[in-house]
Amino acid sequence: MGAQQFDDIVSELYSIDPADFIPLRTERIKEAKKAGDKDLATEIGKLRKPTLVAWAVNLASRKLKTELAGLLQLGDALRDAQRHLSGPQLKKLTAQRQQVVGALAKRVADLAAENGHPLNETAIREVGESLNAALADSDVAEKVRSGTLVAAATYSGFGPAGLSSVKEPATTKAETPEPDNKAAKAELEAARAELKKRQSEAEAAKSAVVDARNRLGEIDERISQLRDELDRAEQERQFARSAERSAEDSRRSADRAVHEAELRVEDAEDAVAG
């Protein structure tokens, strides 16, 4: 299976209108099978149709490249600030995030409407949540960047309730750094525990996705086989129909020949009798 060929097909499928996804995927599967590349056909069959929200974000990755690139760069800065527990920097970037995500979500909604699929308030909110997830998760960011998002993504790691930021130590002599340090460590441990929990949930979700994709691939394969059988049956029906017509023509000719022979017999009998 050619990796580049598969990547090209993925890019093609996730760049078209959602209504055209299934027909085009089926066509590409047939082409791969016809070319003898069963592995490619199987991988294509595993590709899931994007939701309307995912399609809108994928469309933005192609039509709003500059705006989206700026957003994802902000995500890199946010993740770096979170890793280093830089409280002031994190708060500043978080404020920027809220403004940028809100504005870009509206731009995505406008773009979707321009392409025949207006988004309701719920869908626009899910677009914003997906963009937030791209800021926080590098895997989601890559799917958004490449325009191959399958469904709306969510992430609760950024924001006032989800951030693991550290308050700056007070400068007064009445306080010492030690209490702040203990609080930071406790907060860090809590964040790590939450991360472990979320990672476990994500792994379970990924496993469910793989199982569902495999089942979908099996069903698509069966559908393809049934369609092939139907095509063969249609051809056999055409052959049988042609044979029926030919036999019917032969029967009519035979009936005419019998009738003519009967007339000759009658004429001969009349001649003998006379």
Image (cartoon, helix red, strand yellow):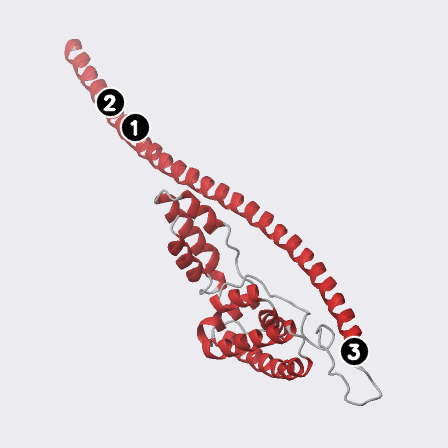
The structure residue drawn at horizontal position 76% and vertical position 74%, both measured from the top left corner, is 184
Mark toward the viewer: 1 or 2: 1
- Of 210 and 219, nearer the camera is 210
| SS label for mark 2 | helix
Among numbered discs 1 and 3, the one appearing first in the sequence: 3
Circles 1 and 3: CB distance less than 8 Å? no
Closer to the camera in the image, 269 or 12: 12
**86 w.r.t. 148: above or below:** below
Q: Could you tell me which residue is drawn at 60 percent across and 47 percent down?
A: 211
- The location of residue 91, given as percent across then percent down, is 67, 82
Q: CA distance from mark 1 to mark 3?
A: 98 Å
Residue marked by disc 2: 259
Amino acid on which the number 1 mark rests in the picture: Ala
Query: Disc 3 vs disc 2: which is toward the camera?
Result: 3
C-alpha distance separating marks 1 and 2: 18 Å
Inspect the image, locate mark 2, and give the three-letter code of the amino acid beneath it: His
User: Few, some or many C-alpha atoms within 10 Å of disc 2 (few <14, some 14-19, many ≥20)?
Assistant: few
Label 3: which residue? Answer: 180
Name the quadrant of the C terminus.
Answer: top left
Mark 3 surroundings within 10 Å by alpha-carbon count, few (fewer than 14), some (14 through 19), many (20 or more): some
Task: Find disc 1 in the rendering and name its residue.
Answer: 247
Question: Helix, strand, or loop for circle 3?
Answer: helix
Q: Residues within 10 Å of mark 1 (few under 14, many from 20)?
A: few
